[in-house]
Image (cartoon, rainbow, N blue to C red):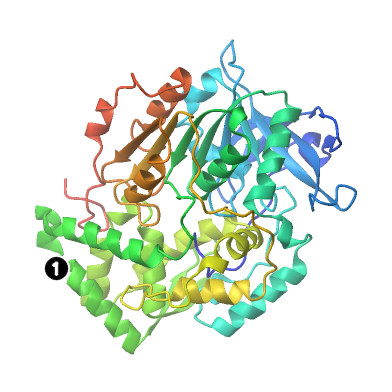
Amino acid sequence: MHFRIVTWLPPLLCLIGAVCNPAHAQQSGAEVELALETCELVVPGTPLSVVGECGWLVRAENPDEPDGRHIDIHVARIPARGRVAEADPLVFFAGGPGQAATETWPLVAHALRKVNETRDILLVDQRGTGLSNPLKCPEIELGEALAQDWDQLAITTRECLESVDGDPRFYTTTIAMHDIDAARAALGYDRVNLFGGSYGTRAAQVYLRLFPQRVRTMVLDSVVPQTLVLGTEHAAKLDQTLERVLTACDTDSDCAEAFPGTAGKLTELAGRLEEQPVEVTVEHPVTGDPVTLTYDREVLASSLRFLSYSSDTQAMLPLLIHEAWQEQRFDRLASQMLIAATGLQQSISQGMEMSVMCAEDYPWFPEDPGTDAYLMGDMIHKAVGIQCSVWPRGPVPEGFHEPVTADVPVVLLSGELDPVTPPEYGDTVAAHFPSATHLVARGQGHIVTTRGCMGDLVAQFIDAGEFGDVDTECMTHMRRTPYFISLTGPNP
C-alpha cells in the first residue's frame, strides 16, 4: 500500500466485442444469468495475459437506492482446463487497495495452474478498479508525484475527486463483496474457494463474514488482520524488515566483506539527506526521458520501501545503500525505485484506494502516530490525513474491525521478510480459525504463492478441502535470494 503517488491505472486490452460491446446482466430482485464471451486479460504495462470469458453485471452504485444510478461490474472466468471441473471455483481477490482481479490474475496464474486444472477461476474487478467503473485519478508525472509538496497533494486529491465518475462513498470493501456474491449467483456456483493477497485478504475475510455458507476453503497470502488499521504500522514494519535484511548481510561472508555495517551506514545516510537533500536525475524506465528528483530522507524511505517487498530486490539493498553512502551515488537506487513506482502507478486505482482507506481505516488513526524514530517517520499518517480531509467517507458496518471467525479450512501464507504484512499478522488471524494452518516462507517477502512450491501446496489444500495430509517438505529448500555483491549479481 502506497499513498504518495496520486494517479494510476490504464484500461484492459480490448480483444473482441465481449469487452468492447459487453453483454450485461441486469440487477433485479430475481437471480440473473451472466452472459460471457471470450476475452483477453492483460497485466497493464506488461506482455502478460491470459484468455478467459468476460461479461458484466449491472449493480446499483448506492445499494440503498436500487432504482438510482447503476454501474457496470466487470466479471471474468477462466474455465477449468481439465475434462472434469469441480463445482466450486476459486474466487481471486486482488491487493492494493486498488488493484483489479482481472489485471492481477495473470501474475499468479502459473503458480496456481494446478488449481485451474480442476476448477474455474472467478475474477471480479472490485468496484472502482479495472473496468468496474474505475475511480482513476488524472495522470501526473512521476517526478511530480514523488515530490514532497504536501499542499500539492491536497490539490491533486481534489482534482481526482472532481474527475471521477462515481460517488466514492459507495466503493468500500463491504459493498463490493455483495457484487462478488452477485457474480457467484449469476454464474450458478453454490460454494466457492477464496484466495486473497495482501488487501485481498481483508476482502476475503469480509466476504466470509457476510456469506459463510458459501465458502468451502480460504487461502490468505500476506495476511491483513481485520483488527489492523491499514497504514498505522507500515513505518515500524519497514524498519523491522530492513534490520533483518541488513543484519543478515553481516552474517553472510560475501556480503559482510563487501558491505560491512550496512545498517549503520543507512542511519548515517538518512541523517545526511535530512540535513542536505541532493538532486538526482535518472531516465524514466518507460519513456527514457530524464526525471529529476530531490532525493531527501522521505524519498530514500520510499525507495527502500518499494525495494523491500520482494526477496529479489531485498538482495540488492546492501549494495545500493553502500554505494549511496560511500560514493554519494543515488542514481541506481532512484532508478530501481522508479521501476517499481511505474508498475504501481499502472496497477492501482487510487480513487478506490482512498475510498477504502478513508472509510475503513483513517477514522481509527491515532492522533500521534508515534513514528518519529522510524525511517519513514509520519509520511503515511500525513499523506492519508491530507487525502481523507478531501475524500468523501462511506459507511462502515459496526464491528468492521472485529476479528472474523468461521469453521472453514484456512491456509495462511506469510513471507519471513515481508515489510508490510509480516508473519505475526498471520499468527493473529490464524488464532480465530479452528481449522487454520499458517505457513511461513523462509527468506521471502510480500506475496509468496508465486515462490518455490507454495502454489502447489495451495492447490493440494484446495483439492483436498483440508490441509491434514499436505507435505510441506519442499518449503525447507526455500532460501532468500543471495545478496548482490556487484551489479552483475551474487558471487558465483
Q: How many marks do you count on the picture?
A: 1
What residue is at 47 percent from the left and 72 percent from the top? 366
Quadrant for residue 440, please give it. Answer: top left
Q: Is residue 460 above or below residue 136?
A: above
Question: Going by the image, does 296 lie left or right of 195?
Answer: left
What residue is at 79 percent from the left and 53 percent from the top? 62
Quadrant placement of the C terminus: top left
Indicate the position of residue 429 as horizontal and vertical percent values.
41, 44
Q: Residues within 10 Å of mark 1 (few under 14, many from 20)?
A: some
Q: Amino acid at mark 1?
A: Gly
- Residue at the extreme top of the image, as rendered: 83
Indicate the position of residue 189 as horizontal and vertical percent values.
67, 24
Q: Can see residue 126?
A: no
Name the residue tied to disc 1: 261
Which is more toward the observer, 376 or 13? 376
Quadrant for residue 171, please give it. Answer: bottom right
Indicate the position of residue 294 as horizontal and vertical percent values.
44, 81
Question: Going by the image, does 263 lie left or right of 89?
Answer: left
Which is more toward the observer, 188 or 410? 410
Indicate the position of residue 300 as horizontal and vertical percent values.
37, 73
Which is more toward the observer, 223 or 252? 223
Q: Secondary structure at mark 1?
A: loop
